[in-house]
Amino acid sequence: MNNPLAGLLAELQLLEMEDLPDAHRAAVERCVELTRRLVQIVREEVPKDL
């Protein structure tokens, strides 16, 4: 579960570095924020042996 989320987060962080229109930048920043929250939830709630 962590690997796909880490991959998604990495791609979003790369996208953040691009020269984007303001509306797109805001959407990417929101996606990064939500993905970080998901990563935290998975780390706290999903058993390590899954």
Image: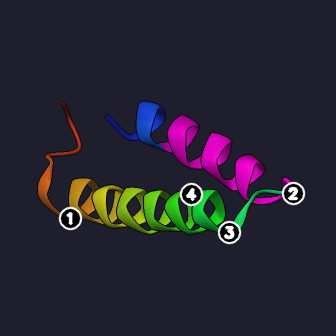
| Element class at badge 2 | loop
Give the residue at x 44% y 69%. 33
Which of discs 3 and 2 lies nearer the camera? The answer is: 3
Magenta stretch bounds: 6-18
When asked about the image quadrant of residue 5, the answer is top left
Q: CA distance from mark 3 to mark 1?
A: 33 Å
Asked if 31 appears above or below 26 in the picture, the reply is above
- Circle 2: residue type: Asp
Q: Quadrant of residue 38?
A: bottom left
Q: Earlier in the sequence, mark 4 or mark 1?
A: 4
Q: Of residues 1 and 37, which is closer to you in this image? A: 37
For the stretch drawn in magenta, the main secondary structure is helix
The residue tagged 1 is: 44
Identify the amino acid type marked 3.
Answer: Asp
Q: Residues within 10 Å of mark 2 (few under 14, many from 20)?
A: few
Label 1, label 2: how far apart the Cα atoms are: 34 Å
Q: Disc 2 or 4, which lies upstream in sequence?
A: 2
Name the spot of residue 41 as percent of width and height, x first.
22, 62
- Does residue 5 lie above or below 13 as drawn? above
Front position in the image: 49 or 31: 31
Going from N to C along the chain, the mark reached first, 1 or 2, is 2
The residue singled out by tag 2 in the image is 19
Q: Secondary structure at mark 1?
A: helix
Cβ–Cβ below 8 Å for labels 3 and 1?
no
Query: Is residue 30 depicted above or below 7 in this figure?
Result: below
Q: Kindly identify the amino acid type of the residue bearing the numbered disc 1.
A: Glu
Viewer-closest of 33 and 42: 33
Contact check, label 4 and label 1, Cβ < 8 Å = no
The residue that label 4 is drawn on is 28
Q: Residue at image x 44%, y 31%?
A: 4
Which residue corresponds to mark 3? 22
